[in-house]
């Protein structure tokens, strides 16, 4: 069975830095929802590094879009780093690329 988790990396530029680790698919994404809501409770910018995401499908893209939406409604900037090629391709295919707040480390 595949696994995924959200790991706190520390504070950065007045906000928080997290890493998303593992496989983002229809089995693992529901388990990440509670952790994501807790991640979004703080203040300041939120950096999410995806370098350790091994695989991802449309469920992973839906999860990121949900977190982006929730962060926006809470007035908390969310920046994505190291977006896996599989997610970038899915986003481009669905014309959702412009919705992803991509940043460089």
Image (tube, rainbow, N blue to C red):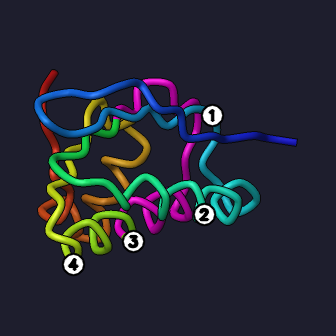
x then y, percent, for residue 92: 25, 58
Q: Nearer the viewer, residue 80 or 56?
A: 80
Question: Magenta segment range?
Answer: 49-65
Which residue in the protein does label 1 denote? 22
Label 2 residue SS: helix
Label 3 residue SS: helix
Q: Which of the two labelled residues, at mark 4 and mark 2, occupies the earlier sequence position?
A: 2
Q: Nearer the viewer, residue 90 or 37?
A: 37
Label 1 residue SS: strand
In front: label 3 or label 2: 2
Q: Nearer the viewer, residue 93 or 19?
A: 19
- Check contact, mark 1 vs mark 3: CB within 8 A: no
Q: Which of the two labelled residues, at mark 4 and mark 3, occupies the earlier sequence position?
A: 3
Which numbered disc covers residue 73?
Answer: 4
- Check contact, mark 4 vs mark 2: CB within 8 A: no
Local packing at callout 3 (Cα closer than 10 Å; few below 14, some 14-19, many 20+) is some
In front: label 4 or label 1: 4
């Amino acid at each position: 069975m595949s696994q995924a988790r959200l790991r706190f990396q520390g504070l950065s530029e007045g906000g928080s830095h997290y890493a998303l680790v593992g496989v983002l698919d229809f089995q693992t994404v529901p388990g990440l929802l509670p952790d994501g809501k807790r991640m979004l409770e703080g203040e300041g910018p939120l950096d999410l590094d995806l370098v350790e995401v091994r695989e991802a499908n449309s469920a992973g893209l839906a999860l990121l879009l949900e977190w982006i939406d929730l962060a926006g409604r809470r007035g908390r900037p969310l920046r994505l780093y190291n977006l896996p090629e599989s997610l970038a391709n899915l986003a481009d295919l669905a014309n959702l690329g412009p919705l992803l707040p991509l940043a460089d480390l």
